[in-house]
Amino acid sequence: MKLSDLTLTTPYVSLDPIFYHEVAPTPLKNPKLISTNPHALELLGVDFSEINEEEVEKLLNGTFMLKGSRPYAMCYAGHQFGYYVQRLGDGRAINLGSVNGWNLQLKGSGITRYSRQGDGRAVLRSSIREYLMSEAMHALGIPTSRALAIIGSEERVARERWESGAIVLRLAPSWIRFGSFEYFFHTNKHKELETLADFLLRESFPHLVGVENPYLKMYSEIVKRTAELMAQWQSVGFNHGVMNTDNMSAIGITIDYGPFAFMDTFESGYICNHTDTAGRYSYDNQPRIGYWNLERLAHALSPLITQEKLKHELDQYGEYFTTKLMELLRAKLGLDSEHENDSDLLRNLFTVMENGRIDMSPFFRTLSRYNGDRSQLLPLTLAPNQLNEWLDRYDERLQSNTSSLEERHTQMLRTNPKYVLKNYILQEAIDEAEKGNFTLVNDLLILAQNPYDEHNNFERYAGITPQQHTNLKLSCSS
Ligand code: AMP
Ligand code: MG
């Protein structure tokens, strides 16, 4: 199918206009297509081979509308850094409609009713980051929004310096956030709150339509999905950076990529967002914040379900989180069964990684070929004695494995990526793109989508992060 054959539907605009603002995108000056993602096109049923680049560019710039499209921005509130803010909403995102269960959204496409003081724009730097990282997360098996294409432009956008405006076309099964519910709860609009819950049920939890206590069951699934998402972030060393409730997806996927980072050397208190001086959204706080945010959602849903019942569901959070984390970490270590001392072995590994300033991704990748010979592993730590002791324990633990060494290696090489898009790698692609060269963006898309494969030309990105680039902090302003 061709892009122009798609027909979108817009169920959200059949709701009362209090839920959204119908607004057309504002085109950027002299747009230029940077990259199109064949995998995302496939999700919509469109053939990459039938793509007309000019059409993609115009679609992103808002000058070509797909059939059935009725652009709108969504209204939501949220707790930002712990404080409630009533009026947020899509200040720079415009939804086009949905097809095949995917809601298409332009990010950076101009002001809406919810823009407040903002300019409705996104800069090239942050757009490249979101475009590549959402695809990288997906390839790692982490639930996330996706990205279909990206355009740059000659539009000047004021941030800490002048930058150029860009737009990403991103996709999600739902763009409803915890903050969407908070908006209606805090304005005492309980009828609308129920309408939103019904909408989300139909859109993303259709198996719960018509069952007994659907809202409670939906909340319970959101608790589970969020807990498991936190476990996935933790297991790969991902720091989101801005876990405000308006950035928390009601379907438990990673959304709103901002100052995120894959950690370079492991640091439990790592904070990727330099405006987060208190470390509210540091790496080790993420699971706790996930819980705190779910409490806010429970509060917002309290007119529909009693607090007691919600609390009961929320109480499962820790169990969901730990179970998932253990499953993921066992897989990273190639352990094919459960053992009562596993949590201690794993906790110890994190201490060893922190004390030895170990870079997680090359470490786990090297460990994926471990056969008792430690010569490749020991140079990866500043505290080799501690790693040696831990490897003694690991050797002993491996004896209870039933799989063969080859099977373990194969499984671990499929679990521990060779390529992780750390910030310094993304920055190289951004520096090139700012000079007008988009080759590296497109190369990194392939790396992001195939992180377990060998890519001989990009061996340099598989090793430890060069010292001067480790654990950089980024700002929210994007
Ligand atoms: P974020 O932290 O990027 O998720 O954004 C928080 C809120 O600020 C959301 O309501 C965004 O739509 C809004 N926002 C962020 N940047 C801009 C911008 N440049 N123009 C308008 N609204 C913005
Ligand atoms: Mg946001």
Image (tube, rainbow, N blue to C red):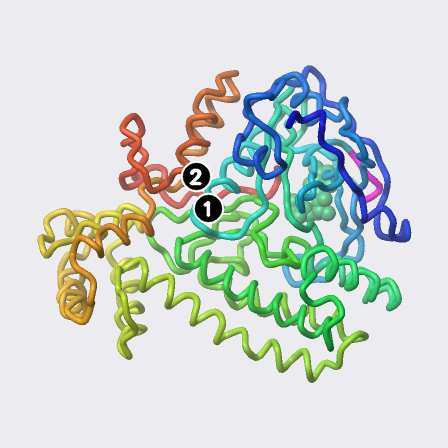
Q: Which mark is residue 261?
A: 1
Quadrant in the rendering for residue 68: top right
- x 57%, y 79%: residue: 315
Q: Is residue 362 above or below residue 50?
A: below
Residue occupied by mark 2:
423
Residue closest to the eye, 27 or 406: 406
Question: Which range is magenta?
Answer: 111-116
Residue 374 in the image: state x and y as whole percent: 11, 53
Place of residue 244 in the rendered image (x, y in percent of width and height, measured from the top left): 63, 57
Question: What separation in Å lies between label 1 and label 2 (alpha carbons)?
Answer: 6 Å
Q: Is residue 416 visible?
A: yes
Contact? badges 1 and 2 (CB < 8 Å):
yes
Give the label on residue 360, or none: none
Q: Nearer the viewer, residue 335 or 72?
A: 335
Relative to residue 181, is residue 55 depicted above or below? above
- Direction from residue 309 to residue 358 in the image, left or right: left
